[in-house]
Image (tube, helix red, strand yellow):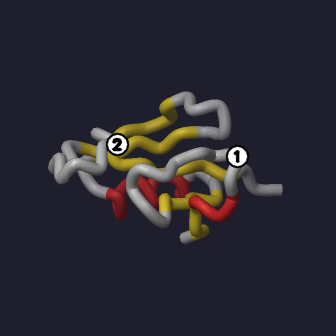
Amino acid sequence: MSKSVYVEARPRGRDGEPISYYVVEDQASSVLHSTNTQAAGIQWAKACGYVPHVARVRHLDDKRKPDHWRKV
């Protein structure tokens, strides 16, 4: 069984802040990896055997709500 991880933008804000980097987090919000692009985070997760998910909307990142995420 594959474990889900979440590729999130940083900062998380919604006030037009530019994205500085991305992190790959587990369900407990522990950072497993950081990278400059979302694509690189997704690639890293898949190479490690994880199932990556990305937020549907940047500031909606509650991991307990599956509607906030889409599998990639």
- At 39% from the left edge and 55% from the top edge, which residue is drawn? 58
Q: Amino acid at mark 2?
A: Arg
Q: Amino acid at mark 1?
A: Arg
- At 59% from the left edge and 45% from the top edge, which residue is drawn? 62
- At 43% from the left edge and 38% from the top edge, which residue is drawn? 33
Quadrant (top left/top right/bottom left/bottom right) for the C terminus: bottom right
Is residue 70 rendered to the left or right of residue 56?
Answer: right
Is residue 67 rendered to the left or right of residue 33?
Answer: right
Residue 6 image offset from top left, x and y in percent:
54, 50
Residue to which mark 2 is pinned: 12
- At 48% from the left edge and 66% from the top edge, which residue is drawn? 56
Quadrant (top left/top right/bottom left/bottom right) for the N terminus: bottom right
Q: Quadrant of residue 43?
A: bottom left
Residue 7 image offset from top left, x and y in percent:
46, 51
Residue 67 image offset from top left, x and y in percent:
64, 64
Q: Is residue 44 above or below residue 34?
A: below
Q: Is residue 66 above or below residue 12?
A: below
Residue to which mark 1 is pinned: 64
* Residue at the right extreme, as displayed: 1
- Name the foreground residue: 28 vs 65: 65
Q: Are marks 1 and 2 in contact (CB under 8 Å)?
A: no
Please report whichever mark, 1 or 2, sits nearer to the chain's N-terminal start.
2
Query: Circle 1 sits in a helix, a strand or a loop, which is it?
Result: loop
Is residue 28 rendered to the left or right of residue 14?
Answer: right
